[in-house]
Image (cartoon, coloured by chain):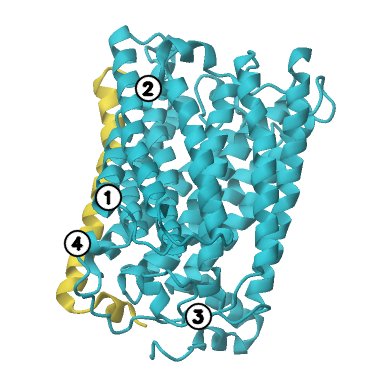
Chain colours: A cyan, B yellow
């Protein structure tokens, strides 16, 4: 198969009608198709989880209970988080990994193509299972995404479905991580040593190892919840000699690496976009690799900063405070290096670059509130308040999600063969960037003023900032429809045809193949000088 | 493109499969290990 001619045999499979089209998408082992499936699934889940967020913000618009009862509110906060973490942001980055890792290392596909297919198709089943629990008589899970016992034991009929859904989501991620590691270690083009790989590939390699170490721990934790509920064990039940706090340790031993699993691929995308639009190589490539590895290592020894109020001994509190503050150092190295990349560069501000710049500033803001939370005596006040909610939404939304948007706009011409509508892209960016701050910045003040999290009603002194936050949330929500329109337009070929190079400053291997990328690329590996 | 063509020669295909199974074993070991450790600590 030629890598220079446009190869449309992927589309040719559809000539048998609807059944053949379905067979193609269900049984595909092509990394581009699977990447597309992951990305479209993530987009759908973005609106499902986002809809839940709008239910939450509608209820919180004013004090009092207007629209929903407290139990349903708790289901919304729980399932919103589970969907956004496991159903949206992780599959989105898995989609980027599938599309771009083989292209960036000069490989014909992922090393285990059939496993790749299974990794994806587990996701719709798992999330359907989770979402259907909302329709059970007792409702869906309502204990928070952290599933702490003993509260989670009151979940009711939804409990075993929640555990099974979490298991399936975890298996999907573990299998995808195995595929990523094995692909990167075995299928790099001749001449591409590890220290010549693009940063996006590096960040995914490190993320995949973190996934392998963290996801099984979550699986173990929820298995123990299951045995406590149904098989008479008492891992977390004080009456039987167990300890609910042990679940918190197990959960956060997974949970903290999990947030780095989310953000490291985002860092990788930023490390691709900023050099391209600065027309300069990434500053300090080796330092960026070592910083990423340091962040990954440190993420394994900070977990109890989520638990400073459980009654931990002082020595433990000090240890976790210090390691948490240390993680700011390699993160700062990355922020400085991205900035240095832009220094004296020939900058242009297309939509991917706008998202990358917004990421740089706003993720750093989120990091600053994280540093505040790391300080134990301060965290005693901040813990379980809206300050925490503001912190993690800043690192997740203008952090991870903005990086995903940057990557989507950056690679959309490669995927679709046409330049997306730049005017609409910029409109999407500005509306999203403004409204995300309107939504989440006031939440810092709410937390500092003492508003607890996970509450459907609040004291009147919190009303004004809650109203502002809710207005921002609705603005942000509706602004995402512009993104859908941009993607649909590009997918239907309505736009200026894109060249293979697309971006003047692009230097990685994906820019050497035509746009749209042929169904099969690099059947013969390129030689890297 | 066939899976064999993606994985290249037989030697590389063997290495790929061996490392995939090894990583899977690592994940399973972590899963069982955390549960076993909790039991050994006196819980369960």
Residue A304: assigned label: 2
Q: CA distance from mark 3 to mark 1?
A: 29 Å
Would residue A119 be found to the left or right of residue A472 on screen?
A: left
Q: Are marks 3 and 1 in contact (CB under 8 Å)?
A: no
Which label number is shown at residue A515? 3
CA neighbours of label 4 inside 10 A, class few (<14), some (14 to 19), many (20+) = few
Residue at label 4?
B18
Where disc 4 sits, the SS reads helix
Residue A404: percent from left, percent from top: 52, 54
Say if residue A175 shows up in the picture.
no
Relative to A411, residue A251 above or below:
above
Location of mark 1 (residue): A289
The answer for how far apart the CA atoms under marks 2 and 1 are is 26 Å
Which quadrant would residue A420 be assigned to in this image?
bottom right
Q: x, y percentage for residue A348? A: 53, 62
Label at residue A43: none
Q: Residue at x 36, y 38 (%)?
A: A331
């Amino acid at each position: 198969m030629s890598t220079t001619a446009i190869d449309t045999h992927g589309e040719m499979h559809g000539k048998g009608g609807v059944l053949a089209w379905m067979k193609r998408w269900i049984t595909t082992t092509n990394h581009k198709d699977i990447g597309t499936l992951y990305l479209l699934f993530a987009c759908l889940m973005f609106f499902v989880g986002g809809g839940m967020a709008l239910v939450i913000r509608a209820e919180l618009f004013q004090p009092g209970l207007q629209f929903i009862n407290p139990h349903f509110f708790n289901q919304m906060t729980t399932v919103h988080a589970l969907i956004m973490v496991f159903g949206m942001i992780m599959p989105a980055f898995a989609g980027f990994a599938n599309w771009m890792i083989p292209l960036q290392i000069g490989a014909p596909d992922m090393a285990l193509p059939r496993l790749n297919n299974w990794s994806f198709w587990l996701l719709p089943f798992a999330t359907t299972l989770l979402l259907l629990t909302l329709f059970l008589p007792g409702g869906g899970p309502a204990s928070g995404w952290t599933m702490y016992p003993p509260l989670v034991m009151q979940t009711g009929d939804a409990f075993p479905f929640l555990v099974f859904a979490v298991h399936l989501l975890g298996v999907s991620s573990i299998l995808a991580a195995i595929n990523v590691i094995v692909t990167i270690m075995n299928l790099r083009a001749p001449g591409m040593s590890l220290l010549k790989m693009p940063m996006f590939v590096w960040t995914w390699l490190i993320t995949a190892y973190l996934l392998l170490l963290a996801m099984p721990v979550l699986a173990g934790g929820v298995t123990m919840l299951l045995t406590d509920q149904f098989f008479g064990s008492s891992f977390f039940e004080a009456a039987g000699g167990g300890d609910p706090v042990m679940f918190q340790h197990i959960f956060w031993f997974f949970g903290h690496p999990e947030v780095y699993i989310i953000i490291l691929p985002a860092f990788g995308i930023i490390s691709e976009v900023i050099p391209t639009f600065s027309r300069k190589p990434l500053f300090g490539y080796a330092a960026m690799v070592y910083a990423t590895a340091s962040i990954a290592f440190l993420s394994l020894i900070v977990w109890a900063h989520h638990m400073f109020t459980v009654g931990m001994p002082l020595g433990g509190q000090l240890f976790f405070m210090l390691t948490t503050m240390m993680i700011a150092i390699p993160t700062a190295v990355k922020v400085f290096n991205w900035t240095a990349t832009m220094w004296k560069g020939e900058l242009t501000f297309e939509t991917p670059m706008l998202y990358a710049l917004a990421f740089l500033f706003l993720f750093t803001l989120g990091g600053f509130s994280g540093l505040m939370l790391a300080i134990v005596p301060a965290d005693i006040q901040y813990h379980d308040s809206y300050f925490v909610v503001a912190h993690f939404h800043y690192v997740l939304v203008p952090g991870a999600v903005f990086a995903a948007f940057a990557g989507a706009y950056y690679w959309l011409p490669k995927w679709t063969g046409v330049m997306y509508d730049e005017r609409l892209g910029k409109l999407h960016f500005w509306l999203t960037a403004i409204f995300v701050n309107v939504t989440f910045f006031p939440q810092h003040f709410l937390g500092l003023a003492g508003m607890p999290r996970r509450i459907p009603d609040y004291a009147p002194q919190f009303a004004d900032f809650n109203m502002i936050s809710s207005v921002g949330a609705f603005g942000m929500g509706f602004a995402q429809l512009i993104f859908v329109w941009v993607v649909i337009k590009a997918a239907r070929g309505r736009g200026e045809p894109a060249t293979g190079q697309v971006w003047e400053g692009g230097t990685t291997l994906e820019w050497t193949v035509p746009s749209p990328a042929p169904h099969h690329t690099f059947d013969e590996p390129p030689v890297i000088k | 493109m066939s899976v064999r063509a993606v994985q290249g020669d037989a030697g590389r295909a063997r290495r790929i499969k061996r490392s995939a199974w090894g990583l899977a074993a690592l994940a399973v070991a972590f899963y069982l290990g955390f549960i076993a450790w909790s039991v050994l600590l006196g819980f369960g």
